[in-house]
Amino acid sequence: MKYILYQLKKHPLAIVGIAVIIFWLIMAFIGPAMLNFTHTQIDSENQIVGPGVNGHLLGTDSLGRDILARVVYGSRSILTVALLTSILSTFIGVILGFTAGYFGGKTDTIFLRSMDILMAIPPLVLSMVILGILGDSTIVSLTLIVSIAFVPATARVSRGVLLTEKSQEYVSAARIRGENHIYIMFVEILPNTTGPIIVEATARFAYSIMMVASLGFLGVGLQPPTPDWGMMVIENKPVIAQAPWAVLFPAIAIASLVIAISIFSDFVSKVLIHER
Amino acid sequence: MNRTLSIVVRRLGSLVATLVVMSFIIFLLVEIMPGDVAQMILGQSATPEAVASLREARGLDDPLMQRYGRWVSGVVVGDLGESIYMQGVAINSILWRRVGHSVLLAMTAFIMFVPLSIFFGVLAGVKENKLSDSIISFFGLATMALPEFVSGVILITVFAVQLQWLPIVSVIPIGESIWQNLSILFLPALSITFVMFGYISRMQRSSMITVMNSDYVRAAILKGMPRKYVIFKHALKNALLPTITIIGMNMGWLFGGLIVVETLFGFPGMGSLLMTAIKTRDVPLIEACVLLITAIYALSTMITDIMYSYLNPRIRFQGGQR
Amino acid sequence: MRRIIGITLLILLIAVPMVFAGGDKEAAEEQKSVRVAEQVPGLITPGVWDGQAFSMNSSIYEYLVDINAETGELDPVLATSWKTREDGKVWEFKLRQGVTFHDGTDFTAEDVKFTIERTQDPGLGHLKKADFEVVASVETPDDYTVVVNLEEARPTFIYQMTDYNMAILSSSYDYAALGESRPMGTGPFKMQQMIPKESAALERNENYWDPNLPHLDRILIYFVADIDASVSMLEDDRVDIVPFITPNIKNRLDEIDGISVISPYQEQRFIAMAVDQEPFDDNRVRLAMKYAMDPEIIARSVAQMELGDGAYYNETPIMNALAEYKEIPHRGRDIERAKELLAEAGYPNGLSVDLTYASDHPFGRELAQTVQELAAPAGFDIRLRGYTRDVYLSQYWLNVPFSITGWGGRIDPSMLLALAFKGGGSWNETHMDEPVINDLIDKIASEVDPDQRTMYYHELQEWFHENGALLNVQVPYLVAINDSIVDYRQPLTMLPQYKYMDIK
C-alpha cells in the first residue's frame, strides 16, 4: 500500500487518470439520480438549445433531449459493455492461453492456428460485419462479439506468461506432489501471473471503449433511445454547425475516459512489473 | 537467401490455408444471417410470391455447401461473382477500383505517420522523463485515445467547414480520377495518422529506452564517448529494428481506422463499399470485401514478418526460430 | 543487390493495385449540367426497382402517362389519348408515334404489351404482379393502339400505369442481363457511363420525341450513402440537388443563401395496432393510445415543423392532401381519459407493449421515440424494437401488435385500401377484417361516380376515427436545391421530371 502511494507521488498524471475514472464511475452509478431530465425526455419546445439555456446544462439535441442526461446515461452502457468485455475476454483468454501453454504440443498448435485465423480479420471489421448483419445491438450482443474479437490478444498474453512460469520450480514441485493439471494451472500458477494479466485487462478496457464507440459511429451501436456515445456523434453530425455541443460533449466523454484508462493502465504496469 | 525463401514459402502456405478457412467462416456467417435478402431487394411492396420467386431465381434456396462451392470455384479463377443487386455487373468491376483508392489512402497515412512516429518516439526515448518526453508522451496518449471518427469530425469542422481549405466530402467528381483529386486524401489520412502516431510513437519510445539502458550503450557512454555519437551510431540502429514489428502489430487498427474514416469522409474505398454492402445485405459483395480485406491484412502481416526476419541479422544469419 | 530487388518487388506489389485506381479523363466542355446526390441504389430495372435512384430512372425511362406536378391531372406521355368502356373494364390507349428507344428501335404497341405482360412473369418477382393480375388480356389491333381487357371493372386503372415500376420497356432488349448495368428506355436522357454504386452520367437524348426538350445537356448523379455528406456537397457547390433530406438538415440549410428546400409532396407513416391480439383487440385501448397522442408535439419532434404546415396527422388511411379527405377535428390530448379507458379495458395499472419499426428509414427513430414518450404518462410502457428495414419487413412487419411503417402517397388510394385494410389483404398490418370496411372498400373500387365515391371515403374515415387501429403521420418529402435550378418538378409518383428543368 505504501508502495502504491509512493508510486503515485512519482507519477502525478496517474492521479488525474484515476480521478477521471472514478468520476465516470460515480456518474454511471448515481448520475441519473442527480439529473433534472431523463435521457429520453423529448422537449419539442427546446430543440437545439445551447448549453445553459432553460436548465439544460449541456444543451439539447434536435429532438430536444438533454445532452447532459444522455452523456451520463451513456456512461452506464459504455462502461458496462467495456468492463464486461475486458473481463470476459481476459477470462476466456486466460483459460485458452493457459491450456495451450501448459499442455504444449498438439493443443498448443491447434490453439496457435485458430488464433491466427481469428486474428486474420481486423477486430473492427469482424465486429462490424456480425453486428451489422444482426441489426441493432444489445449490451449482450456487443459484449459477446467484441470479447470474441479480443480473445486472440488476451490469449496470447496469457500463454506467454504461462510459458515463463512453467519452468519455475514450484510448478515441478506441485507436479511431483501429484496435483492435477487444473489445480496447478489455476491455483499455483495463476496467482503469480496476475501482474501482466491485469495490465492486459486494463488495456483491453481502453480498447473496448474505443471499439464500442467506433461501432456506435458505424451505426451498429445500442438500440435507441439508449444513448451510445459513438451514435450520438454520428446522429448529431448533420447539425454540427447549429449544435456543436451535441457532438462535442460525447466526443470529450469518449476521449477523457480512454485517456484516463490508458494512463491508469500504464501506471498499473509500472507498479506491478516493478514488483517482480 | 534460402532461409528467407523458405520462410516466405512457409508463410505463403499458411496464408493460403488461413484464407481458405476464413472464406468458409465468412461465407457461413453471412449466409446464416437473419433477414431475407430477397425481401430486402424487392422492398416493402413485395408479395410473398414475388419474394419466393426471386429466391429461386437467384439460387438462394440451394443447399449451403452447393452455394459455397459455387462461390469458391469462382473466387479461385478471379471471379468474385456478381453483386446480388446487379445481375450482369461483376463485383470485380466495382471492387478493384476501390481497393486501389484504399491502398492509396493507407499509403498516404503511412507516409505521414511513420516518419513522425519514429522521430518523436526516438526523441522521447532519448530524453526520457524530461519535459519534452512528457509532452510527446502525453500528446501520443491523447491522440491514441481519440477514435478516428472523433478526430475526423474535428478536422472536418476546422479545416473544411470553417477554413474551407479542403473539401468536406472526399468524393471524386464524375469523369475524373483520384489522381486529379489528391486533396481528398489529406484529411482522412490525417485522422488515421493521429491514432497510429499514438500507438507507434509510444512503442518506439519504449524500444529506444530499452536500448539506451542496454549494457553496451551504457558502457560506451561510461567509456567517454559523446552521447550523440552513441545514439546515432549504435542505439538508433537497434531501436529501429522492432519498429517494423511495431507497425505490423498495429496494422489491425489501421484497417479498422480505414473503414471508419472512409465512412466519415465518404471516401470511395473498400471500407465504405463494405459498409454499403452490409447495409444493403449484398451478400456476394460482403463476402468479396471481407475476403479481400482479410487477404490484404494477412498479406501485410506476413510481409512485416518476412521483412523482420530478413533485416534482423540474428535471424538471417543464424536461422533462429521465430 | 538482393536488397534492391526485394525493395523493388515490394514497391511493385503496392503500386499495382493503385493502377486500378486510375480512371478515365473526360474532356470538359461547356455544357449545361445538373449534378444530383442520391442514395446508393439497389436494383434499378423497372419491375424489380426498389425505389431508389429516382433521378436516374425517371430520366431514362418513360411511362404511358404522367401526373402533372402542379395540377395532379394526368398528362399524356407515351400515350396520347385513352378511353375506357364498360365502366372501366376495357381500356384503350392511343400511342405516340415517332418515338424511338435509345438503342434506335421504334416504340410500338408491342412494347406496351410486353411491359404489361411482364408483370405476370413468375420468375421475375415483379412488384406490380398482384396489381396487374386483374388484366385478362392485352391486344394490339395496330402498331399504335393498345387495348387492355380487365377481369373486373376498375374505374381508376389508369393510375396503375403511373406507378414507377411501370416504365415502358422495349420488347427487344435483354433487360435480364443488361437492365442493371445499361438501363435503356425512351426518356429525355440516356446513360453515358455508370460506375456501379458510385456515380452515373446521363446525356441528352438527341432523338427525344419532343424537340424542345430536354433543356439540359447532362445530368451527373452521385450515389452517396450518407445524407450529411450529400448536403455537404451541396453546400460546397459540388452538387445542385439533394432529394430525401431530413428536417434537421432543412433547418441547417435555411440559414444558407443560394439553397432552398422544397416539399413536392407528402409521405405517410402508418402507426398500426393489430386488432386480433392483445392489447389492441379492445377498442378502448386503441382509443387510449389515440388520446395519449399530441399531434403538435409529433409534428415538431418528428418533422421539425408546425402541425398543418408541412406535417399532418389523422387517424385514417387517407392523406390530408387528397381530394377525398374529410377534415375531422383532432380529439385533443387527454391523459386522464386515456387512463380511464385503459382501466375500463382491464389495465388499471397500464400495460406493456413492443413497438417495432425500421430504424434506418427516415423519420422512423424519431417517430418511435416520440410515440413512446407521449404514451408513457397514460400508462403505456412501450419497448422500442428497431431493426434494419429488410429485417423489419421480412420478419416483423405483419406479425407484431404495434408497428410503424412508411407508405408512399397515392393519387388513387383505393388500391392501397384493398391491400392494407381489407380482410385478407396481403399488406394488412392491422389484421382488420371488418365487414363494414370490406364492403366500403369494394364499393369504392367499383364506383364510377366520383361524388358517390367521395361519400364512401368519408364514411370510411369516420369509422376509422372512432374504431380504427391506425395513426397516420404525414411527413414532408423534402428536396434541397440550388437556387440556380429552374423548374424542378416532382409529382406524387416520386419521379422527378428533369426534362423541364433548366439551370440559370
Image (cartoon, rainbow, N blue to C red):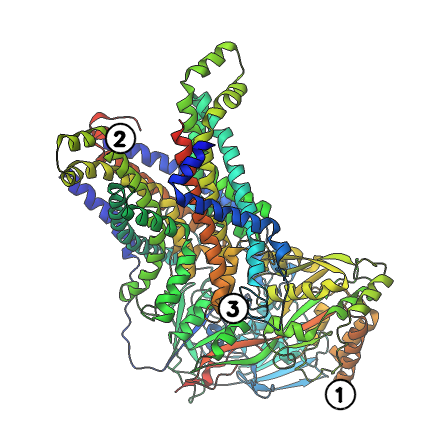
Asked whether C411 or C171 is in front, the reply is C411
Residue B1 in view in this figure: no
Residue at disc 1, secondary structure? helix
Nearer the observer: mark 2 or 1; the answer is 2
Type of amino acid at the residue the image marks with label 2: Ser
- Which quadrant would the C terminus of chain C be assigned to in this image? bottom left
Please tell me how crowded label 2 is: few (under 14), some (14-19), or many (20+) other residues with Cα within 10 Å: few
From the viewer's perspective, is C337 left or right of C1? right
Query: Residue B316, image x and y in percent?
Result: 22, 30
Give the chain of mark 3: C
Residue C198 in the image: x percent, y percent? 41, 64
- Pinpoint residue C166: horizontal percent, then vertical percent: 56, 73
Q: Which residue is mark 2?
A: B6
Query: What residue is disc 1 on?
Result: C451
Q: Position of residue C165 (x, y in %)?
A: 56, 71
Q: Quadrant of residue C89?
A: bottom right
- Up/down of C361 relative to B23, above or below: below
* Residue at image point 46% right, 16% down: A171
In the picture, the disc for residue C76 is none
Confirm or deny contact between disc 2 and disc 1 (CB under 8 A): no
Q: Is residue A241 above or below residue B151?
A: below
Tell which of B177 and A157 is nearer to you. Answer: A157
Real-space Cα distance between discs 3 and 2? 53 Å
Q: Chain of mark 1?
A: C
- Label 3 residue SS: loop
